[in-house]
Structure formats: structure tokens, C-alpha cells
Image (tube, rainbow, N blue to C red):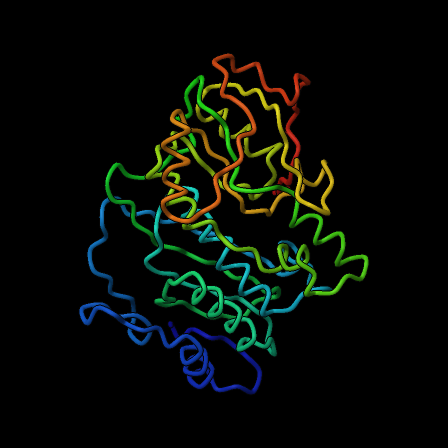
Amino acid sequence: MSDHLVNQGAANEDAVVKRIAAIFLPEVKNPKEVFIGDDAAVLEPFAGQVIISTDVCVFGVHLDQNLFSLEDLGFKAVTSALSDLAAMGAWPRGVVLGVSAPPGTDLDLLHHGASMAAMLCDVPVVGGDVTSSRDVSVAVTVFGECPGNGAVLRSTARPGDGIYVSGPLGRSSAGLRLARAGASLSDDLVVAHRRPFPRLREGLAYRNGGATAMMDLSDGLGLDLHRLADASNVGFRLDHLPVADGATVAEALAGGEDYELVLTAADEPRLFAMCDARGLPRPLRIGTVDADTAVRTLKDLPLTRQGFEHQL
């Protein structure tokens, strides 16, 4: 954990950094590895391909700061970043946090949320940095590994492949709607929004089960599936939309932040057998990849792009 903490009120810089580092206390299972406490982390060689991704979570943009806590922000920042590893079929090896916050921010609470997420996902936080800024944001870099045939890309779907999702859609968007209407923070749908969980085990199973393309649904099926089709130069025909209990069709299509996985596969029995062997629910088939890039339909009607897009 780096010590570049700037102007955090009356708190001593070294004391704050030491306190944050103590929140994580990662167990170093390999004596040749070094996590928090030096200028940089030291990790042993990865198995197969090294998978790296960075994500930024901003309080007030990715999470409503009037409804949810800094602990929720820390948790969501870590799990949403890890979801990118799940989308590649990778297993995580480490997390690095970069926190920016105004003076007086409860950094302990934020890092407790991040620590909880890392613990639940069985991945160590190996380092980070803290500095002052106008807004609260958490930049998370995650490292993972893909042995064997390597990562599953979004650009390799093939005509005739089945299209699947890892679970019903719309839970996160429905949870935000309910929270704004006064629902309890412990409501299942509200929890799905403020404390999403990455499909790491599922992504690994899908990769080993022959997934031909895959990505996570951070911005909504109605946008992310188009991105997968664009990258693979294909179209799609959807005949089913699995809407989560309590969600609407619009939330399932365009709500975003579900962090379920959408994937394509040619060998359904192999895919299902891998999930069965690992005690995981089978993914839900929703359609078929089409060779014609102009064919993008849901129940034979055109499916336009719809989902969350940042305005930059």
C-alpha cells in the first residue's frame, strides 16, 4: 500500500496508510510473494496467459451516494472489476486499489468493503495508493490467469453457436428502483445492486466447457450483446429473455450492472456437463448466433441498442 496520502485532515499520513494496510492483512501463501508493505507487490509466475483489467468506480456515478455507503462502494468497486476476469474465464491472483477522496472521508469504511469483497472472492489485495480529490473514486486493477487454451474473447462467436446467460437479468436495476422507493438495504434486489458478485466460478466452468465467446453484462444485454456481435462480426436471434423476479423487461434488457455473463457455445452437452460436474447452475439458453450481421432480433422483432452508456 503506497503512502502518497495527501491532506487527509488531521490524520497522520503514515498512520492512515498503516491502518488501511491492517484492514487487509492478506495471507501470503507463497513465501516468495510479497503483498502490502513494500514499494510494489511481488507475485510468482502465472499459469498460462496473464489477464489484467482496470475499472473505476465513482461515488455518485456508479453508486448513489444518497442511498448507499462507502463500504458498499469499496465492495462494488472490487467485485465489478473482478467480473471482467470472470468474463475471460480467468481466475484472480491479485487486486490493487487506487482510492481518491476528499479530506475527512471515512477511508476505513471504504476499505473494509473492499476487503470483504476480496475475501469472499478468495483473492488478495496486494497493494494500492490513496490520495485526496474532490470526489470519491476507487480505481481497481485486477490480475488473473488463464491456463490451457487461454482466455475466452468476445470476438470469437461463430454462426450456429447457442447464446446463453448465467442467470436471470434485471436484478440490479430493479434493486436501484426499489431502493429509491424506500426499500430496505437488505432486500435481495437492493443487495444485488449495491453488492454485486462476480461469476468467477461460472466463467471458469464455461471456458473449460467450450465457450466460444463471452463477456459480462455491465451495461445491459441490449447493449453488451451488440458489442459481442460487433466484435465477432455476426448477428443474433434471441427467442427468450430471462427476466428476474421483481424486475421488468426494460430492466432486464437495458438496466445494466447485473454482472451476469453472456456467452456463446457450440457444444451444449459439454457446457452443461462441465457445470454439472462443478455443482453450478446451467446457463440459460436465450438464442442463436446468426451469420448475417444485420439480423439482431428478439422474438423476431428488431432489437435496438439499449443500455447504459457513459457520456464522456
Residue sitting at x 65%, y 54%: 61
Q: Quadrant of residue 265?
A: top left
Q: Quadrant of residue 119?
A: bottom left
Horizontal side of residue 165 vs 2, given as left or right: right
Residue 139, x across and y down, in percent: 48, 58
Residue 271, x across and y down, in percent: 39, 34
Q: As drawn, which residue projects farthest toward the left? A: 32
Residue sitting at x 51%, y 41%: 166
Residue 233 vs residue 55, the one in the foreground: 233
Above-or-below relation of 307 to 226: below
- Please state, as top left, top right, bottom left or bottom right, where the C terminus lies in the image: top right
Q: As drawn, which residue projects farthest toward the right? A: 181
Residue sitting at x 58%, y 70%: 71
Residue 33, x across and y down, in percent: 22, 68
- Please state, as top left, top right, bottom left or bottom right, where the N terminus lies in the image: bottom left
Above-or-below relation of 278 to 38: above
Residue 132, x across and y down, in percent: 54, 70
Horizontal side of residue 152 vs 10, given as left or right: left
Residue sitting at x 24%, y 65%: 42
Instruction: Report the number of numbered marks.
Output: 0
Residue 6 vs residue 298, the one in the foreground: 298
